[in-house]
Amino acid sequence: MCGIAGYIGQRNAVEVVLDQIERLEYRGYDSTGVAFQSPEGLKVLKRAGKLGQLRAVVADERPEAFVAIAHSRWATHGAPNDLNAHPHFDQEGTVAVIHNGIIENYLEIKEELTRAGHVFQSETDSEVAAHVIGLEYGEGISLEEAVRRAVGKLEGAFGFVVISMREPGKIVCSRNASPLVLGFGEGENFIASDIPALLPYTRRVAILDNDMVALVTKDGISAMRSDGQAVELAPFDVEWDIASAEKGGFEHFMLKEIHEQPDVVRQCLAGRLGQEEMTLLGLFSDHVWHDIDRVNIIACGTAYHAGLMGKTLFEKMLRLPTDVYFSSEFRYNDPLLSPKSLAVFVSQSGETADSLAALRLCKERRIRTLGIVNVVGSSIAREVDRVLYTQAGPEVSVASTKAYVAQCLVLYLLGLHIAQVKEMPGVDVRKGLKAVRGYPDAVQEALELESAMQEAAKKFLDAPLVFFLGRGADANVALEAALKLKEVAYVPTQECPAGEMKHGPLALIEEGTLAVVGATQANTRDKLASNISELQARGGHVLGITTKDDGLIPGVSDTVAKIPATGDWYLDALLSVVPLQLFSYYMALYRGCEIDQPRNLAKSVTVE
Ligand code: M6R
C-alpha cells in the first residue's frame, strides 16, 4: 500500500519521483521521503505527513540529480514520523533503501546486528533490511549482487529499491509479493509500485516478478532470478490513457468513478456477449464445470460483498452450493475444501495480502482456483489457475465503486456461462444476455438520481447512525452501501436483513433515525412493507430504493428513489447500489471528509 518511485535519466530526478509519488497518493500514506545522488554524496530528505511537507524541504535544497528514489509510507512498524519515513541508510550510509511490505524476521536480524554494533535510527523493519543490504555490499560486489544476496536472508513480503554513490549509474530493485513495475524510456528508465505513476513518462512497462532482482540504468533494464540466473523481462504497452487515471473534471475520483460505471459495464461486457451465447475466454474446459460440486468465494471488504452477490446468484440460479469467506479468516479456520470445489478470489487490486495468502493455501491443497481481478498482471491474477478480468480500468478512489459493479457483473456472466455449459433447463441464458445488454443504459439512468441523493444527504447530514436494510440480494447490497457510508463519510451504520431488525437492532430506532431500505426484490416486498411499518411506528424515517415498476414500496416510504427495472432480480439489486454510492459521496462531501483518501484506510492492503 506504500508508494514507490525511481528514476534514472537526464531529467531532474527528484522532480520526477515526487511527481510519481503524487500519482500514487490514492494508495494512502502517512509520510514521504526521497533519496538522490548529490555532489556531496547520497542525500535523504523525509517528512511525516502529506507530500506537501516534503516538497517544502526539497524546495529549500533545490537538488539537481539524475538518479532518485522516493517513497510514501503507510505505517506498519513504528509510528508515522520523520525517522521512520523512508528512505533508510545502512550502517555506513553507503546505500539508501525504500521498501514496501513487511520483513517477518527483522527482529532477530536486528538483535544480531545490534550485538555486532549496528545502530538503528528508526523502529522500522525496512531499516534493518537496509543494513543487511549494506553488509552484503562488500568490496568487489556489485549493487545488484548485494541486493540478491540480502533478499535471500530476508523473510516476508517486500519490494525494495536501492541506490548508492559507489555505483552512481544504477538503481537496483527486487520484489517478493509487493508489486514493482519497470518503465522503459529513451535514455531514461523508471520504477514504480503501480502503473499510473509511470503513465506520464512511458507506456512501455514490465512487471517485475517475485524473486527477481532488476538492474536499472539510464540505458536499459536487466533482471535476474534470486539464484543469479539472468531472465528476460516481458515489456508490454499499457493501453490506459493518462486521462483515465486522472479526475476528468469531477471534484473527486470517487464521483468520477461512480459516473464511469455505464462505460465500465460496457467494457466489462466487451467481447463476451453474443446474441444467443456468451463467451468467457480462458476459463476451464466445459467438463470441469460438471465436476465442480461447490464454490468458495474468498475476498475482503467490497470484494467480499460482491462475493455475497455471487453466492445468492449461484445458489438461486445454478443450485450450486456456495460459501463466501473473508480472506483474513479463511486460512485460520482450517477450511473444509472438497477436492471438487472451486475457489474464487475476487479482488480489485489483485494484491490484497489476505486474499493472496488464502489463494496459496488453496493451491497447496490442490483446489482449482479462479480470480476475478481488475489489475492486469497483479499477483492474484498471475497465481490463480484461471482469471477473469473485470476490465473496469484503474480505480483510484480508496472507496471501491466501479470495481464492485464490475465484480458483480463478472459473477453474473460466470453464472450464465456455467448455466450455458451445463445446459440447465431452468435458466434462460438468452434472457439474461438481453438484460445485461441493456445494463449500461440502466446504470446511466440510475445516475440521474444524483440530485435526489444530494437532497437526501443534505437532509440526513448529521444522522448519528444510519440503518441499511433489505431482503435477499438487497440485503447484500445493503452491506456494501453501509461500508461506503462508513468509509467515506465516517457515519456509523447498522446493516442487516430487514427481517432481523425485530430480533435486536430495532431497539436502536428512535425519532428521526434514517433507515435506507433496498426494495428491488419483488418476492419479498410484502414482508418488507411490514418491516418498514415497524420502523416508522418507532419514529424511523425510511428512504426506499426500489424499481420503477414497484407499486407498493413508494406508497409506504417517507422518501423514495426509483431505479429502472431491468427484468432481472440480480441486476436490479446491483443497480440499487448506484444511488447509494452517490448518497455516501454527498454525505462525505457535506461533512467535509477527505473523500478519495479516507482516514486510516489505504487502497491496496498488502499486509496481512
Ligand atoms: O483490492 P481488493 O479488492 O482485494 O481490496 C479489498 C478491500 O480492501 C476493498 O474492497 C476495500 O474494502 C475498499 N476500500 C472498499 O471500498
Image: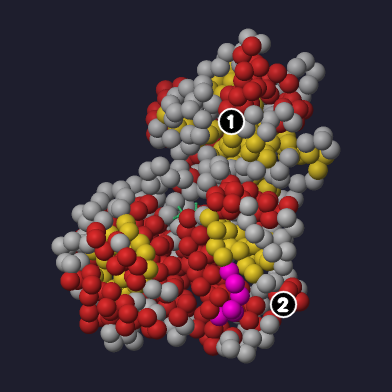
Query: Residue at point 23% right, 72% down?
Result: 534
Q: Secondary structure at mark 1?
A: strand
Q: Amino acid at mark 2?
A: His
Camera-side residue of 106 and 57:
106
- Residue designated by label 1: 98
Q: Amino acid at mark 1?
A: Ile
Per the rendering, the mark at residue 290 is 2
- Nearer the observer, 300 or 581: 300
In the figure, is residue 231 to the left or right of 87?
right
Which contiguous range is marked in magenta? 317-322
Query: Quarter-wise, where is residue 298 in the image?
Result: bottom right
- Residue 28 included in the magenta stretch of the image: no
Can residue 454 be seen here?
A: no
Categorize mark 2 by other alpha carbons within 10 Å: few (<14), some (14-19), many (20+): few
Q: Is residue 401 left or right of residue 295?
A: left
Q: Is mark 2 within 8 Å of ligand 1?
A: no
- Is 487 left, or right, of 384 in this rendering? left
* CA separation in Å, label 1 and label 2: 49 Å
